[in-house]
Image (cartoon, rainbow, N blue to C red):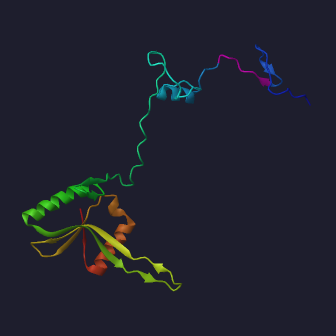
Amino acid sequence: MTKRAPWPMVVPAGTTVVGTARVRDDSRPAMTTAQRRIYELTGNPPQTSALDDVDDNDPFTPRLIVPLASPAKQPKYRNTKCEHNGIKFDSQKERSRWFHLIQLQVAGAIRDLELQVPFVLTDRKQRDDGTWERASKYVADFVYTDVATGRQVVEDVKSAATRKNRTYIQKRKQMLDKFGITVKEI
């Protein structure tokens, strides 16, 4: 067994092998790939602080470049929430449909237009162990009365992907069973 060198180990310049280990030469790159990418993004060389005072007159002094904040996580169905006159909509398509329904109401084709109307599908019930089971609701995007037929119409704005949502399908079926209402998908 060999005797270990004292720490910190000092290796004389020009030495290529210490024991069984090779000594790296100084010709290796000054920056690792990660350090180089950070330098390209921020303009700060490695092992320097972005908070150091820099001379504003020196054109060769790296400047702090603040990268844009990463965007927030996109919604599951790629919808864009929006607002109009204090009314919040889950998507731009829903807001567009709201504008169209308002025009139909002004023209007299529909009446009693309502937004985000809840329907209770199953009531709150108490279990055998004393805990409560929550009530199940379906919230329709739009409810109005069609003037020509006199029937109540329940509309929901759906994309091709959200029409396949199992929870939505189940609630749509319960609406038909309990209230006899067919949900009109737009």
106 with respect to 57 (left or right): left
Residue at 44% over, 33% down: 67
Residue at 51% over, 86% down: 128
Residue found at the very far left of the displayed protein: 107
Q: Quadrant of residue 136?
A: bottom left
Q: Quadrant of residue 146?
A: bottom left
6 with respect to 172 (left or right): right
**Which residues lie in the magenta part?**
21-27
Residue at 12% over, 60% down: 103
Q: Quadrant of residue 28?
A: top right
Residue found at the very far right of the displayed protein: 1
User: Which image quadrant: the N terminus?
Assistant: top right
Residue found at the very far top of the displayed protein: 14
> Is residue 32 placed above or below 160 in the rendered structure?
above
Q: Position of residue 13 (x, y in %)?
A: 76, 14
Magenta stretch encompasses residue 125: no
Camera-nearest residue between 164 and 1 = 1
**Is the stretch drawn in magenta largely helix, strand or loop?**
loop
Magenta stretch encompasses residue 22: yes
Camera-nearest residue between 104 and 176 = 104
Q: Position of residue 112 (x, y in %)?
A: 16, 71
Camera-nearest residue between 174 and 70 = 70
Q: Position of residue 17 (x, y in %)?
A: 79, 20
Q: Position of residue 179 (x, y in %)?
A: 27, 79
Number of numbered markers? 0
User: Which image quadrant: the C terminus?
Assistant: bottom left
29 with respect to 180 (left or right): right
> Is residue 119 placed above or below 94 in the rendered structure?
below
